[in-house]
Amino acid sequence: MNQDYIVPNNWSIIEEGFEAERVKSSESLFSIGNGAMGQRANFEEKYSGDTFQGSYIAGVYYPDKTKVGWWKNGYPQYFAKVLNAPNWIGINVEINGENLDLASCEIKKFRRELNMKEGWYNRTFNAVLKNGIEIKVNTTRFLSLDIDELGAIKYEVTPINSDAKVAFKPYLDAGIENEDTNWEEKFWETLEVKHDENSAFIMARTLKTKFSVATYMQNSILVNTISANVKPVEVQKEATTISFTYEIAASKGQTVAIEKLGGYTVSTNHKEEELIRAAKNVLDQGNKLGFDTLLKQQKEAWAKIWEMSDITIEGDVKAQQGIRFNIFQLNQTYLGKDSRLNIGPKGFTGEKYGGSTYWDTEAYCIPFYMATKDQNVARSLLEYRYNQLDKAIENAENNLGFKNGAALYPMVTMNGEECHNEWEITFEEIHRNGAIAFAIFNYYRFTGDYSYIPEKGLEVLIGIARFWHQRATFSSDKDKYVILGVTGPNEYENNVNNNWYTNYIAKWCIDYAYEQIEKVKSEYSDDYSRIMSKVNLDEPELNEWKKVADNMYFPYSEKHDVFLQQDNFLDKELIKVADLDKSQRPINQKWSWDRILRSPYIKQADTLQGFYFFEDHFTKEQLERHFDFYEPFTVHESSLSPCVHSIQAAVLGRMEQAYTFYLRTSRLDLDDYNKEVHEGLHITSMAGTWMSIVEGFGGMRVKNNILHFEPRIPNQWEGYSFKINFRNQILKVEVSQKETKFSQEGTTPIKVSVFGKEILVEPNHLVTV
């Protein structure tokens, strides 16, 4: 834990008191989004202090030319940047001609709140300006879930100690830059700036990718909550900005306010020539409803989301706050409405990492969306990869020289092309192929919907199997197939040979693809004929696949009786993390890369990731032995690490350790464990937090087409509950220190297994175990 200023609360993220050094962290923590757009919690008014301005539009990106010191053949030409979009939230405020700026005035009673239950963000504070006037400010904003091109702000000012002339200066600004650029290029060109009486529009287009965006605003003034017919006294229009000035004489104690509607219309959803008209239509909808009705609808929309996705925890407010924060941010980032989109690692909260899609989606996020949404949301995530299969084949062929339809999915992508510019990650961290295949298996296991495999998934599995077949090398010395020069999930080891997890999932992928080919052949003959004709696959090739899978090499230590993370792991100086000076942590911020690579320290679950995916392949004794060997060397400096370790600690009955890991994953950003929250939140790992409760403490698994549970509960909790949408039946699980209760919403009974004993849960009946 590196910060502790967020007030514990079951449903809200709250900060009390203003500290300038916390501003950028809070901009991340209080971010808002609606799946189509999002923004950091920047102040609406001018702020001259240290800030990270950020607004983002889903699917809009820029291909920033790769920048490396030594170009290697095969490097991606660009690194896709999540694009900082034109700013529509700005409202500069003047009091008797003096700018309101929290960096230069006295601040009293500062408080901000992100209400997760209802989906809004609020700030209140008193400020004493240099001219001696004290004002109270109350500002609320949200991004509509129902009208996802629309956001709304209500900004209220009340003079406290005298009458005052208040000037609101709302503006649009398209002259923005990314915090993260390789060549300090401009990413946008402004095409048009125009306005009506109280509305303004800026048309802008991204360079290279040619996304066109209309950014817009409409303003209205209120005095003591009553709409006032106040027109702008001035309009300032420049090449990339436009601002209005509204002046109101406010008596002492009288509240004046501006309501600002704004947002984006984008050429991915509208014809370019109709973007401004589309923006006006959105504003018309917003105006007809009004701020208060829009806010009411926002609360209702979030209530529906929470009805299915909420996890309750009794007796531990910080744990409760943590899981709800994670669930809230996941739903702000991706709602499954648009199959062209995916789940970026920073969502709408920052620019680090770039890209919209990593293996995180398949490994961590799909289980959350399968269980808390309609199964079509998860299926859309699978189809996203199917739609990019041709690009994955091109990636393997053009950059690695593979042939015959072998597919290497990108480590980072926006449109199917690889756009990560670190060689060790781009072309060595190839295990991501395995997660994509595993997600297909996991989807069928959970939903029972096999149709995806003959329709689309089998082609993906064949491309991935072909990749592993060609990527493996026969070692005459070992008389086995080996996989050389890789980076496993532990990115603190690059260019190693025979990473156990990579080899294991490669074998599994080939075996699973082979099994599905046989199943489709016997049960879906038309699909089989279509696919085999398309991919030109024959028996001799299948036999070559099996030869590789059946003879894959797995490094193993007889001395420690564990699989080795890679061939030379035992050559390292095996000093455990507990014996490392705390001043050296986090090592990724304190050590040279050379020192990290030579160390035994593990960034996240690697061998243990394989034990997580393929738990049924190993005994609990094997898991315990490997957990005890590898966890002491794990520094958990990846956001994806604590959740897997929490699940496995729970399986082993080590509840204190499981609880500690749970707190770390659930409050990773709230407490800034890795000293980087100012850069944005860790969105994809938040799905792992959900898994740590449902799969870890709840012990939920799918075996033989039914749900299995082994509920456990930390001593710190009085109880917890969650819901699962399993094959269109909603099952609720409530766990206390004494018992577990099951109930279900539906019309047919559901069979579940609890600690190996099958029970029948009837509709609208409570079963206690």
Image: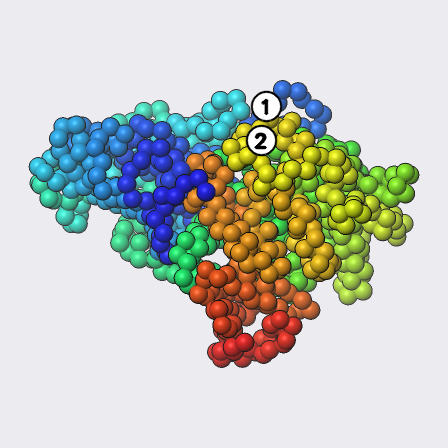
Using the image, determine if residue 536 lies above or below residue 193. below
How far is the residue under mark 1 from the one under mark 2? 9 Å
Viewer-proximal residue among 19 and 713: 713
Assign a secondary structure to mark 2.
Answer: strand
**What's under tag 1, amino acid-wise?**
Lys
Viewer-proximal residue among 581 and 470: 581
Where is residue 320? Give x, y as percent.
42, 57
Residue 296, quarter of the rendered image? bottom left
Q: Looking at the image, which residue is at 39% across and 56% down?
A: 317
Q: Looking at the image, which residue is at 33% across and 42% down?
A: 262
Where is residue 686? Give x, y as percent.
51, 49
Q: Residue furthest front?
A: 579
**Mark 1 closeness class: few <14, some 14–19, many ≥20 residues within 10 Å:** some
Report whether 675 appears left or right of 450: left
Task: Please say whether residue 228 is visible from this viewpoint.
Answer: no
**The disc label shown at residue 67, or none:** 1
Residue 68, quarter of the rendered image? top right
| Residue position for label 2 | 79
Where is residue 54? Give x, y as percent.
41, 35
Q: Looking at the image, which residue is at 46% across and 48% down?
A: 667
Colour scheme in the image?
Answer: rainbow
Task: Please say whether residue 540 is visible from this viewpoint.
Answer: yes
Query: The C terminus appears in which quarter of the rendering?
Result: bottom right
The answer to the question of whether label 1 and label 2 lie on touching residues, with beta carbons closer than 8 A, is: yes
**Mark 2 closeness class: few <14, some 14–19, many ≥20 residues within 10 Å:** many
Return the disc, 1 or 2, that comes first in the chain's sequence. Answer: 1
Q: Residue furthest top?
A: 69
**What's under tag 2, amino acid-wise?**
Phe
Viewer-proximal residue among 24 and 333: 24
Q: Looking at the image, which residue is at 82% across and 41% down?
A: 482
Report whether 521 appears left or right of 161: right
Where is residue 94? Give x, y as percent.
19, 31
